[in-house]
Image (cartoon, rainbow, N blue to C red):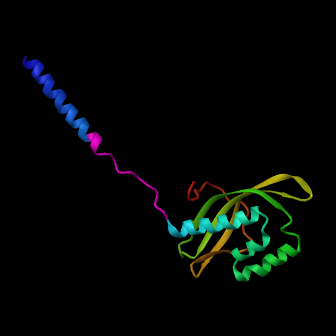
Amino acid sequence: MKHQTMCSVSLLIIAVLLWGCAGSSAPQLTPQRNPDRDALYNRAKELWDAVLANERGKTVDFLLPEAREQFAQYQAMGGTSFNTISYNIDAVEIEADGIHGIVVVTNTFIAPPIPYPRTVPGQITNWVKVDGIWYHDYRPAPMMISGSRNAPGQ
């Protein structure tokens, strides 16, 4: 009888301990949201959606005013004769100064004279925040990066 009582008490103690452990769950880790990073991601997405829709006139609104002339020259040279068929925002980073950022994009497009799609992964686009709004700083940039980074919402 003494053995049975001891087993019952031990089982009761184990049950109470297990119940207590189940009630106190480990803290949930949630990724911290960065409003600037999210705003840059959304702005870049709007730009690439306009490119995807072939709304070239609308894309100018996303450029820094001082970059618009360079973009117009690029267009005049036939630089926008490609047709983007898909894109993916691979990474968004804000520099320490808080006003410069990069958006890394994988872009799939068709460009004459080659009739089949080509994909350019890791295309770096530079961005600058002016008066709280992110603008694409259209300037020469390295086309490829190595490594993996995460974009918001992915």
Q: Main secondary structure of the magenta part?
A: loop
Image: 146 above or below 132 = above
Q: Position of residue 87 (x, y in %)?
A: 71, 57
Q: Does residue 139 appear in this view?
A: no
Q: Report the front residue among 145 and 153.
A: 153
Give the residue furthest to the top. 1
Image: 147 above or below 2 = below
Q: Is residue 104 left or right of residue 17?
A: right
| Residue under the image location 46 percent in, 57 percent down | 31
Q: Position of residue 52 (x, y in %)?
A: 75, 61
Q: Is residue 52 left or right of residue 98?
A: right
Highlighted magenta segment, given as a residue range: 21-33
Image: 13 above or below 31 = above
Q: Position of residue 16 (x, y in %)?
A: 20, 36
| Residue under the image location 83 percent in, 68 percent down | 80
| Residue under the image location 28 percent in, 45 percent down | 24
